[in-house]
Image (cartoon, rainbow, N blue to C red):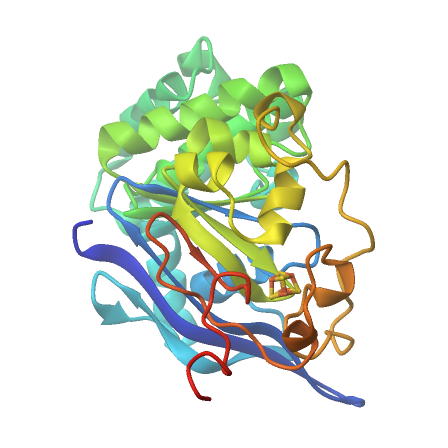
Amino acid sequence: MSDPLLEVRNLRVQFATRRGVLTAIDDVSLSIAAGEVLGVVGESGAGKSLTGAAILGLLEPPGRITGGEIRLAGRRIDGLPPEQMRRIRGREIGAIFQDPLTSLNPLYTVGRQLVETIQTHLPMSDAESRARAIELLAQTGIPAPEARIEHYPHQFSGGMRQRVVIALALAARPRLIIADEPTTALDVSIQAQIITLIKRLCRDQGTAVMLVTHDMGVIAETADRVAVMYAGRLAEVGPVGDVIHHPRHPYTVGLMGSIPSMTSDLPRLSQIDGTMPRLGAIAAGCAFHPRCPRRMPICTERRPELDDGARTRAACWLHVAQPSEIGG
Ligand code: SF4
């Protein structure tokens, strides 16, 4: 892989509460190269959206980064003053969230919002930025963009609104897009179109994408590599084909059970019993052990680190040399 555009190292996010400090992201490291799509997958509460928010500098207090570092093109961006981070958001990192209405101002036409975003980040005249706004709407598949640019967000359907949000996210030609469940609120028939659109636009522009989703099917369609998260930790990381066809972590195997057509040759779990633990109730040792069908005694005592597997890296004692085997 070429030098990573985004590099997250040993990230820790904690929440100080009256009941003590809760760790929501625990020692997460991942990277994305230019033009690459990294899927980050896991059930609700796995920490994937929080990881995206930490990268964007959008953690809600009392959540804060308490360890590790985040680099964009080699430059450290965690801990920057809010004003600098605001400039990086939009200019260097674009964001697409689940609900398009959180990204759009209902009081302004989409054209005004696009032009303002473009002019905030790029030195363009009114005429140039309007032309770029129309071009962006056309690129994102909005028919009659010269007319639609004068319309307000409520005049668009859900799928068309998400296309406008994609146009906004790409307006300043960012190097990285963080897309958090970008299709979850949309009709199934529209979802594939939006995913294809994000992938095509980013490939054409060499933009890297961090795609956060609970949907392994979306990952299979879109991602080059996958990071599987569980309880704020990485369970498995690797190229999408390997993770899907040869999952090594029992949690990944369970997630694969949710896409029937892909699992015919895999040992299937019809579902993963149990639920994601609450913050503050994460089990000792391997966080997945209360739900794991392959649990061993060591799993309740010692936390496994990511191994150096040939295809994927998994944090599971089934694959990591156990302390007794290495004299530890
Ligand atoms: Fe299951 Fe143990 Fe592997 Fe955790 S470390 S996933 S409990 S086998």
In which quarter of the view is residue 293 placed?
Answer: bottom right
Q: Residue at x 39, y 74 (%)?
A: 78
Image quarter for ligand 1 equals bottom right
Query: Is residue 222 positioned above or below 65 on the image?
Result: above
Q: Which x, y percent locates residue 54?
A: 49, 66
Q: Which x, y percent locates residue 318?
A: 54, 61
Q: Which x, y percent locates residue 306?
A: 44, 66
Total labels drawn = 0
Q: Nearer the viewer, residue 132 or 49?
A: 49
Q: Residue at x 68, y 36 (%)?
A: 268
Task: From the viewer's perspective, tell me whether residue 215 is left or right of residue 36.
Answer: right
Would you say residue 151 is visible in this rendering? no
Q: Nearer the viewer, residue 8 or 94?
A: 8
Query: Is residue 141 positioned above or below 46 on the image?
Result: above
Would you say residue 93 is visible in this rendering? yes
Query: Is residue 102 positioned above or below 134 on the image?
Result: below
Q: Nearer the viewer, residue 135 or 244?
A: 244
Farthest left residue in view = 2
Q: Residue at x 59, y 33 (%)?
A: 266
